[in-house]
Amino acid sequence: MRGLCYFFLLTQVHSSTISVTGRVGQNVTLPCSYDISTQGLLSFCWGRDEVPLSKCSNTILSSEDGDIQFRQSSRYQVLEEKKGNVSLTIVNAQLTDAGVYGCRIEIPGLFNDHKFNTHLVMEAAFFTEKPPTYTPEHLEIGETTLPIIARVLPEEKSKTFLGAGNIARAAAIFFSTVTIILVFIFRRRFWPERPHQHLQTPTAENIYESVPGPDTRNQNQVTAFQTAEVLCVSLLPFLLCQLLGYVSAESVVASAGENVTLPCNYDAQEHGRHPVCWGRGAQFHWDCADKVIQSDKTSVTSRMSERYLLLGDLDQGDVSLSIIGVEERDSGTYSCRVEIPGWFNDLTHEMTLTVMPAPPEPLLIETREVQKRSITVHWTLVFDGGRPVTSYRIYLKPTSGSWDTAVTTRLSNPELTQVTFVDLRPATTYNLRIFAVNSVGVSESSNVLTVTTKEAAPGGPPQDTQLEALSSHSIKVTWKPPRADLINGVLRSYSISYRGCDPVGRVFKKWQHQSVTATQQLESIILTNLRPSTMYKVLIRAKTNAGVGLPPLPLSAPLWMRFIQLQRQKLLSLHPPLPPQRH
């Protein structure tokens, strides 16, 4: 009967464990399947805990012969049950969904059930942008969101048991267990049973003082076998736990580029400091395999790379291994050994590190050149997350607007590290940020640049220009500033140019100029000392620190209307008052 119980315990090694990483707000699928072509339609269940000896713990979904019998929430879906794929899809996953999930597929027969334990890790959602509301023609617009796919990495812990370093130890434990069981069988088969009364609760008749005689030797042998049996019964659970411990080694899942700490501790206050080593691979009986770092009682004596550090409090026995900027090639088994004097006293600890690719790290961008209507920026890629960068997304907006209104540009050439924006407005402040994209996802935002383009000469004329003849020698000119989006900087002043024209010879005189400081919304000037009976042309141009507005065009018939439209120039003839008529 005991042998049957131990066999039942050994059957619990069958289950496997995987790790799934999901994003908040996305759908996450936890895999679980079987071969429906050979097994037929089977019953199954999902629970919020590891699979127990029977059924599921904290059942959230169950099915019998193809019919869903229980569903805790509509967010739990099984989409391809009829095909043998009973993977659990969690709709709109949240941080509270993180934890261990167990799937049991019930196969007829003893110990035939398939069991899958899944550790779900939830992470914050990647940044996404809404589609832009406007875009210049020269920009190539790409998609503004990427689908987020849950990253699944099989980590069957039973494979750890099959490692070369564990086979010898597992074999020793197995043969020790078999030996103990054989002792039980030998004891029951070949050694006479004690009287039935000795198996019951002790009574006064059963308590007696042994007297030397012919049965004393036999009694001593029986007592020795009983003692051995007690020791075997005590040791067997320990050996089984050791065996199961190799199968279910602790594991750590990290993203590429992160700093990871693999824990290892002992009581240094009670036992004092001891030499420590960390190695790549399963533990040897006497040392660490492929040492990555080693320490004596006081300091680190050797290390494979500066990326391996012991940052814990050594006085407290914290000899945890810190790995800086992990990469996918860092994945594997790590073993910690604390060397304590004496036979079989060393403390050992094994961990499995799984490094998963991640989105690129945020870019560092800087301004290279700023002109009146263009901005050139350059960026540096810090770390690609373990997967090559495939494209970049650039967002540009006026500082007064929100990112929802930003213009987005997708650069599909991952070799680019510099870009120039053109057709921008002068004297305008812009915000700019860039995201890097690889096959895993989108990076966090780069640093946000705030750049103001240089001023330019006004791009439009003053508005509502009016000319009024005050006398035969003066004209009053009034006007308003150009449109705000055409000023192109800070409006400083206005240039007033005028000249007379001989109405007989149609010959213009030399230009005369005056300047008016820009101070208000309605500006004016009175031109004096003009000649009577003379036609005058008046030209008003706005001025910034970058220069005055567009220069005047030649006065020719085909260009006259355009000239009037851009420069707001008008012609006016002045005549002296007519003398009174005589009767």
Image: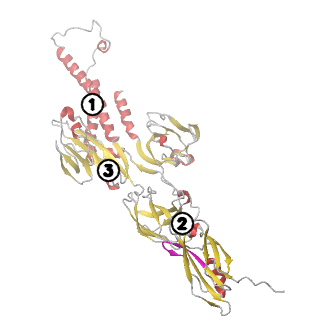
Ranked by sequence position, the earlier of labels 1 and 2 is 2
Q: Nearer the viewer, residue 58 or 302?
A: 302
| CA neighbours of label 3 inside 10 A, class few (<14), some (14 to 19), many (20+) | some
Residue occupying the point 37% across, 33% down: 9
| Marks 3/2: CA–CA distance | 42 Å
Ranked by sequence position, the earlier of labels 3 and 2 is 2
* Three-letter code, disc 2: Ile
Residue 431 highlighted magenta (yes or no): no
Where residue 80 sits: x, y (%)?
56, 48
Residue occupying the point 75% across, 84% down: 578
Where residue 389 sits: x, y (%)?
42, 62
Residue 566's place in the image compared with 223, above or below, is below
Where residue 222 sits: x, y (%)?
22, 19
Ranked by sequence position, the earlier of labels 1 and 3 is 1
For mark 3, give the secondary structure. strand
Q: Which mark is residue 332?
A: 3
Quick check: marks 1 and 3 in contact, CB under 8 Å? no
For mark 1, give the secondary structure. helix
Q: Which mark is residue 141?
A: 2
For mark 2, give the secondary structure. loop
Q: Residue furthest top?
A: 204
| Marks 1/2: CA–CA distance | 73 Å
Q: Which residues are magenta?
A: 539-549
Q: Nearer the viewer, residue 572 or 485?
A: 572
User: Label 1 belongs to which residue?
Assistant: 180
Quick check: marks 1 and 2 in contact, CB under 8 Å? no
* Three-letter code, disc 1: Ile
* Three-letter code, disc 3: Gly
Which one is in front in this view, the residue at disc 3 or the one at disc 2? 2
